[in-house]
Image (cartoon, helix red, strand yellow):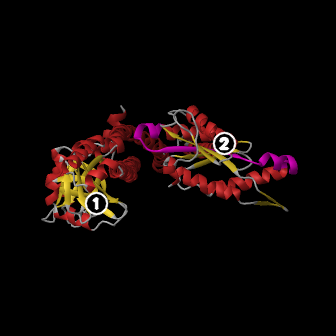
Amino acid sequence: MGWRRMGRLKLDTLSGRIFVFFFVLILIAQLGSIGISSTLSDSITRQTLRNELVTAERVVRRQLAQNTDYLDLGARVLAADYGFREAMMSRDIPTIVSALDNHSARIHADWMLLTDAHAMPLATSTEATALLQHEPLVRWLRALPRHGESATLATVNGMLYQIIAVRITAPIPVGTIVAGFHLDDEVAQKLGAIAGVRLSFARLNAGQRWEVVTSNLDAASRRLLIDALNQPDADWDTVLDRPPHRMLGVRGPLAAVPGHRVELVVQKSLDEALAPFQKLRNWLLWLTLGGLALAGLFSFRIARSVTRPLVALATSADRIARGDYSRNRRITAPREIAALSHALDSMRERIAQREARILELATREAHMLDLAYRDSLTGLPNRALFNERLEQSLAVTLRAGAPLTIMLLDLDRFKQVNDSHGHLLGDQLLVAVAQRLRAHLQRGSDVVARLGGDEFAFLLPAATPASAAQIARALLDDLARPFPIGDHEFEIGGSLGIASAPGNGRDVLTLMHEADVAMYYAKRMRIGLAFAQPAQTPKTVPPAAQE
């Protein structure tokens, strides 16, 4: 019945215009919401991917630096070997070659060679023969400083090598040990798995065109990447953004021998990241179609209900115009409009009262949540909020392999201040301490919380133990400065325990326990700072962290 009436609906009537107005308005609103959600999801996904790619690039560079350190250590161990030095001084080439082969196998280097003080080759491991003809590498060796070590990248016969050179002094430079590590597709697979990205090493060849020398991409994706890198506008971060293989990436240069240009390219699939939003858009489209059908039906009914009183008034007026007074009936239209107006006013008042009540309840709930998650004295997050943030960050760390470090801080002489000068000054001192602790938060994701009493905690989701140690030392130096409270100056200091995931634990309780043990060890030994160890034996800051 309703649909037959809709078929007779004329657009030049008031009811038809009301129907079209509401239907078109709802259609525009639904299509606008779909467009806005699509734009926002694309923008948010791109920004999130770029942030993840920047982090992943740092992870890859850190892994390459660690591998360089490993090669450097192995070369320095061989350079310090007395027997090797003796063979070098006596020019015992077979012994030198054997030592180079054995040591390269021991440190998993692909080749090693020994040069004299003028960068002329004396002996090479079996795999290093072709390198002696590589002029850019020879020029790099000749330009090395007279003491210490250097690292670089070089492509030899189309293969990319990570190279470390260590000078041998006795006490003047007498030679150089050079070790190389082949960065092949297997290495790219491992680095990409660690960083959670698609990883490529590209070099600019003699024809001034980019080519991919090492990657964990398949053949088709490599070709697309090469085409994208060689486009005139390839200097921007998005190295490949064309359907059906839309990839976002960042690229950056790597240190290479003179005349070589090597860049690191990390990528992630934009289509994979947008897949959940695509499903959401499909559901929203179906909901929109269903909503439009219902909107059409209800718009028609609303239009009829609005115009019906006007039709009744027009009919009564027509009867009066024809002089038909005998069947004069009481016109109820004004009363219906008044009732509708009264109902709308009543609804408005009730909605206003309800909204005010909802706002009051929401404000009260927000205040209760703030009390539940905030320390009322210092305004810092409390233990409950800290544990919640730690659990969230720990889940990200275990899934993505990103670094995570926590620090527990206990003030050293706060109890004496509290006992000697009263709780009022003690509370003021805690507020001053909290202000100084906030100043040492370096990232938006960092959190400092008061766990209770004079115990505080730091959550550093993007910090390694070494970078956390730098923050800890700066924090301890800051706490060592006097605190002016009223007419007094207090010197308190603190003790810090540092634990990181997953090395010191893979859950909140274990990490907190390990950091607490390290903190009490630092307090007992009066060393200010201690690291938790996997074997639960805390120790002071290691030499690597001190550097």
Q: Name the residue under label 1.
A: 175
Q: Mark 2 points at which residue?
A: 382
Dot 2 falls on a residue whose secondary structure is loop
Residue 280 sits in which quadrant? top left
On the image, the x and y values in percent for residue 87 come to 26, 51
Reply yes or no: does residue 231 show up in magenta: no
Q: Distance between the residues labelled 2 and 1?
A: 60 Å
> Horizontally, is 145 left or right of 339 in the view?
left
Left or right: where does residue 314 sit relative to residue 435? Answer: left
Mark 2 or mark 1, earlier in chain? 1
- Residue at 65 percent across and 48 percent down: it is 527
Residue in the picture at 39% in, 53% down? 58
As rendered, which of 346 and 449 lies closer to the eye? 449
Region rendered in magenta: 395-423
Q: What element carries label 1?
A: strand
Q: Name the side, left or right, on which 36 lies relative to 447.
A: left
